[in-house]
Image (tube, rainbow, N blue to C red):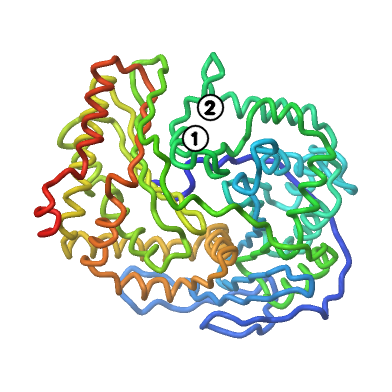
Amino acid sequence: MRWRSVRERRASRGGSRAQKGSASSVRDTGAGKRGGSAALPLSTWELAPSRRGLGERWLPRAHHSVHRFELTNGLRVIAVRQPHLHTASLSVLVNVGSRHESERDNGISHLLEHMLFRGCARYPSAYALNRAIEELGGTLHGATHADSTLFELTLPPDNLGAALAILGELFASPSFCELRVEKRIVREEVLEYLDEAGQEVDPDNLSRQLMFAGHPLGMTITGSLQNLERFGVADLRAHLRRHYVASNLVVCVAGCVDPQAVAHAVQRHFGTLPKGVPSGAQAAPKQPSEERLRFVESLGPQTDVRLSFSTFGARDPRYLTLELLLRVIDDGMSTRLHRRICEELGLAYEVFASLEPYEECGVLDIGATVQHDKAQLLVRHTLALLTELRDKPPTEAELSKAKRRYKWQLEAILDDTQAMCAHYGQRALLGQHGHLGALSTAIDEVTPAQVRQVARELLCASGLHVVAVGKLDRTQRKSLKRTMTSFDRRPRAARKSS
């Protein structure tokens, strides 16, 4: 099971800078259920004895409190206080990605993310920038998604202020030097998804093209080679001015930190960013595209298959139920998908299910790479498995296991400051709080009947799209098409009775 975007593009580089601003112009907009904003020295941590059983040692308290602030320029700041930890993570999330682009400027968000690692006024080269970050004990990472861009690093808590200074300067005055060199790097990234003839062969990119034809969500994150070649520094600066504005950013810090000190540091180094306006995006199409099946010929001994279903988005109140449905389908080797496709039928070495959520819509993907003549069998048995879930709710035992594993995952990220930043930062971009405690409670309230209802609504022919990248002959293509078109063709009475 994959929980991160299957089209995520990551880059490891570094950044740096400092700005001045009035620390008094910070407004505290509330905290999590475990606490206020009492000052905590960055080096302070607490220990509490465990009384739960033999063999347990003295462990740090795993409590965390979430503090939210808003600067006068509209920038949102989240500080997650975890005094028992010895690290701190910093994430800056920008509400811009490939879905905010047009066909002509597709790829500019991704190139800008890369170019921000090329230096700024104080550190005028990629080397100087990387060296400055690494001297603090961290490594800066970047990722561009369809609807957001992320910059993140983890480092000793005492160096958090210096890291904020570097990122503040980087966003305010990037040097944009060595553009031609960076283009060569990005070109190699684009080529990873093309064959020798320049044809797109990445099944995830092809799936989005199929599902969102003519819409920005159907475009690749990296853009085309032609666009890459055409982009200049003026294009990058214009994109930066439009989207890297305070009202479009979230700064999230987690770990052994003082929330008030974090807010004042962010105000100092990001407070002079212009407020701007949040990025707007073209609404996703309400009707699925007419083309539902695409074959792309590609050499090799196997065919890469994607079955993709349209879903509702991360803002929908049923999204948590959808996540639990996904876990019933694929969350370990004992769940339905791996057990059926791999263990029982031997059709694939590996099979996965994943969610890629956007604000108002999303995609549930199921994929595997199989021998060419097994592609139709993979599709047939996968659709049969999904039909079972649609016809009959998961058992109490299945759903209980899915809930326990989900809640354990939430508990596990308490030890991962970078994961905490990702969780609370992404929720903030959506206008949600998403406190882990409230989320855990909500998980307990989901019923098997609700999971089945979501399955009935989403796992249907009207939302299904299939991509097969490989070398299927005419007979194999026809067979796969028949399997797909026969999905959901049960007698009307049978559908009603179920």
Q: Residue at x 20, y 53 (%)?
A: 389
**CA separation, marks 2 and 1?**
8 Å
Which quarter of the picture shows residue 80? bottom right
In primary-sequence order, the first of circles 2 and 1 is 2
Position of residue 449 measured from the top left corner of the image (x, y, whole percent): 21, 67
Q: Nearer the viewer, residue 274 or 179?
A: 274
Residue 349, image x, y percentages:
28, 31
The residue beneath circle 1 is: 205
Label 1 Cα crowd, 10 Å radius (few <14 / some 14-19 / many 20+)? some
The C terminus, quarter of image:
bottom left
User: Which image quadrant is residue 85 in?
Assistant: bottom right
- What residue sits right under mark 2 in the picture? 193
Labelled pair 2, 1 in contact (Cβ < 8 Å): yes
User: In the drawing, does residue 295 fall left or right of residue 240?
Assistant: left
Q: Nearer the viewer, residue 298 or 288?
A: 288
Which kind of residue does numbered mark 1 sit on? Answer: Asn
Q: Residue at x 54, y 14 (%)?
A: 197
